[in-house]
Amino acid sequence: MEQYKKEFIEFMVDCGVLKFGDFTLKSGRKSPFFMNAGLYVTGRQLKKLGEYYAKAIHEHYGDDFDVLFGPAYKGIPIGVATTIAFYELYGKEIRYCSNRKEAKDHGDAGILLGSPIKDGDRIVIIEDVTTSGKSIEETFPIIRAQGDVKILGLMVSLNRMERGKGDKSALSEIKETYGFDANAIVTMEEVIEYLYNKPVGGKVVIDDTIKAAIDKYYEEYGVKS
């Protein structure tokens, strides 16, 4: 496992973004783990988050693209932080763009926030986590409506590795439906492998009890990718 992935796993735990216990998801599923990217709130946290995303995007998509598109709302700060980090790490100017929930009809009018999207742009979509693919359903037509563009792929922070709407993971369903790659900084398989019986900040977060709960959860909802 790459070093930045190990660091990112500990980073999620340290920031309280990735927690283990007993949680009820929006889908109604009872999950032994929960991720809330809204808890990245400080300058240091956002700086580090942008760096992890930039490294993962560079690994999967290189630097031959023009725009990072972060769907509103959580995708906005992630997109901004990552464009800054991408320049600092790789010296490449990437433009950031997001959508508004409601179009603005004055001043900086329109549905987009940040850079316009134009014909020929190559785009990477950036999100926190995808469980159902609903945000991509909303985002995809907005991007396609801007012109003759190419979407290289999607990058999320965590692949939960569980079924989406059907029998495949949400990321696999996105790839199958829209025809572009979907990747994550880390997968839950990597998280479990790295954290099982390993202290982080002096505390073991995945002990035998939590591991058993995770295994049971994946027996019901898990997929391989």
Image (cartoon, rainbow, N blue to C red):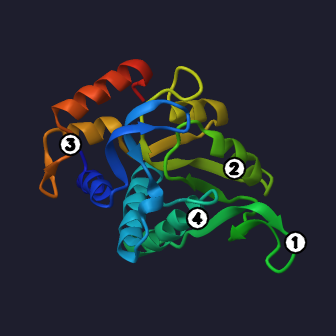
Residue designated by label 3: 194
The percent position of residue 61, horizontal first and vertical second, equals: 48, 51
Q: Amino acid at mark 1?
A: Asp
Q: Residue at left 37%, top 60%? A: 52
Mark toward the start of the polypeptide (1 vs 4): 4
Q: Residues within 10 Å of mark 3 (few under 14, many from 20)?
A: some
**Residue 187 placement: quadrant:** top left
* Element class at badge 1: loop
**Residue 164 placement: quadrant:** top right
Residue designated by label 1: 105
Q: CA distance from mark 1 to mark 2?
A: 20 Å
**Residue 58 placement: quadrant:** bottom left
Q: Quadrant of the C terminus?
A: top left
Q: Is residue 140 left or right of residue 103?
A: left
Picture disc at residue 38: none
Q: Residue at left 33%, top 47%? A: 19
Q: CA distance from mark 1 to mark 3?
A: 49 Å
Picture disc at residue 76: 4
> Is there any visible trace of residue 127 in the rendered image?
yes
Labels 1 and 2 touching (C-beta < 8 A): no
Mark toward the start of the polypeptide (1 vs 2): 1
* Element class at badge 4: helix
Q: CA distance from mark 4 to mark 3?
A: 29 Å
Depth check, front residue: 49 or 175 = 49
Mark toward the start of the polypeptide (1 vs 3): 1
Q: Is residue 100 above or below residue 200?
A: below
The percent position of residue 126, horizontal first and vertical second, equals: 54, 55
Q: Quadrant of the N terminus?
A: top left
Q: Residues within 10 Å of mark 4 (few under 14, many from 20)?
A: many
Q: Is residue 177 left or right of residue 31?
A: right
Residue designated by label 2: 139
